[in-house]
Image (tube, rainbow, N blue to C red):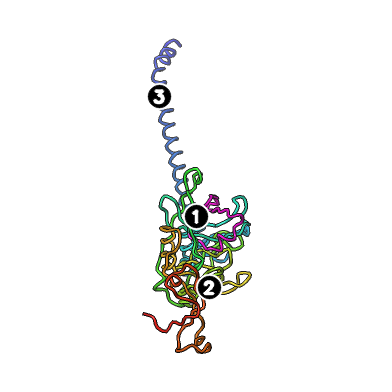
Amino acid sequence: WQSAQQRWQGSSSWRERYWERFTTEGFRSSSRRFFTAAREKLMRYRRTSLSAFLCFLLLVGHFAPFFPSDRTGGASLPSSSQLSQAELVRIRALENAKPGVVHIIGEAASSDQGGGTGWVYSDRGHVYIVTSVRAVDTTRHGELHVRLADQTVVPARLVGLDRSSDLAVVEVNLDRTSLKGSERPRPLRLGSSASLRVGQDVYIIGNPFGFDHTLTRGMISAVGRTLAAEGAARPVSGALEIDARVHLGNSGGPLLDSSGRVVGMATAASSQKGGGGLGLAMPVDVVAQRVESILERGHVNRPELGLGLGPDGLAERLGCAGSGAVIVEVPKGSPADEAGVRVGDVVVAVG
């Protein structure tokens, strides 16, 4: 028994080594088999999931046109690929010009104090805005304020006006206090009205009935029309006729071409009561010339004779000797008055 016990005890180190080797290799082998099987199952699952996801995308892309894009009833914005070229032109013109179009109002706390539309002509430290005489005249108590595109309201000052062309220039001082962190409005790009053609598309941005930045589409119906503005001493020739309706709130708004450049200023001077009359616009070449004159002198400086002529044939009906134009009016202090011209004289030749 003792010898058997000694042999058993002597072999304890061998048993420990054997058990340690058995358990270590067995654990490693079992772990290796487990992780290998798990990795293979995971790869099969990934391949199966990826295939299912790709099939799902293909099905969605195939059947998407047959289902509404918004089941809640809300309108989603169309992408550029879903819009026509003409629609993109109109959208681009509005987005580019919108920051430079303002609302001329009376009292700062209300938008119902008359007014109209204006647009930023230049930024020379102070921002100069072009608008119509009607927009300035319809404000109450002579108070002028300008509402910018971001709804910031700032006080304004009238620089000068020209009733013959229904044009007025307003100045605003946009310092950091008045802007309150909002973006400074940008002057609009000026085009040329000399090359405008009948049938050409034009767009008006205005504020009809107090609604800001309304886009109206039209075309040039005729050129060279005569504008007889209310309260003006004389009519202005060379105006543009447009088929877009010019409401009182649109008066003074920019007339844009397809490139978003200003080619005129909309005026309601010849509109019938209610704003549904003839749509006219002052050509931008005339507007720019008279705005620069107002900024330099405070008024439009134009040559004049200072006399009024009667209708054709008046000399013959009055029995005057010879034919010509009968002078029916000579304002006091005018160049004609200083030259000695009198009412009843007949102009028989010029030059």
Please tell me whether mark 3 sits on a helix, a strand or a loop. helix
- How many numbered marks have been drawn onto this rendered protein structure? 3
Tell me the residue that label 3 is attached to. 18
Please tell me whether mark 2 sits on a helix, a strand or a loop. loop
- Residue at 59% from the left image edge and 50% from the top image edge: 108
Q: Residue furthest top?
A: 2
Tell me the residue that label 1 is attached to. 53
Q: Is residue 203 visible?
A: no
Dot 1 or dot 3, earlier in sequence: 3
Does the segment drawn in magenta span residue 84? Answer: no
Q: Is residue 113 visible?
A: yes
Dot 3 or dot 2, earlier in sequence: 3
Amino acid, disc 1:
Phe
Q: Nearer the viewer, mark 3 or mark 2?
A: 2
Amino acid, disc 2:
Ala
Say which of 278 and 325 sits in front: 325
Q: Quadrant of residue 146?
A: bottom right
Crowding around mark 3 (Cα neighbors within 10 Å: few <14, some 14 to 19, many 20+) is few
Tell me the residue that label 2 is attached to. 228
Q: For marks 1 and 3, give the CA distance.
A: 52 Å
Q: Nearer the viewer, mark 2 or mark 1?
A: 2
| Quadrant for the C terminus in the image | bottom left
**Residue 278: horizontal and vertical position, in percent?**
56, 74
Q: For marks 3 and 2, give the CA distance.
A: 118 Å
Crowding around mark 1 (Cα neighbors within 10 Å: few <14, some 14 to 19, many 20+) is few
Q: Quadrant of residue 206?
A: bottom right
Say which of 55 and 64 sits in front: 64
Dot 2 or dot 1, earlier in sequence: 1
Q: For marks 2 and 1, give the CA distance.
A: 71 Å
Q: Over which residues does the magenta segment extend?
A: 130-159
Amino acid, disc 3:
Tyr
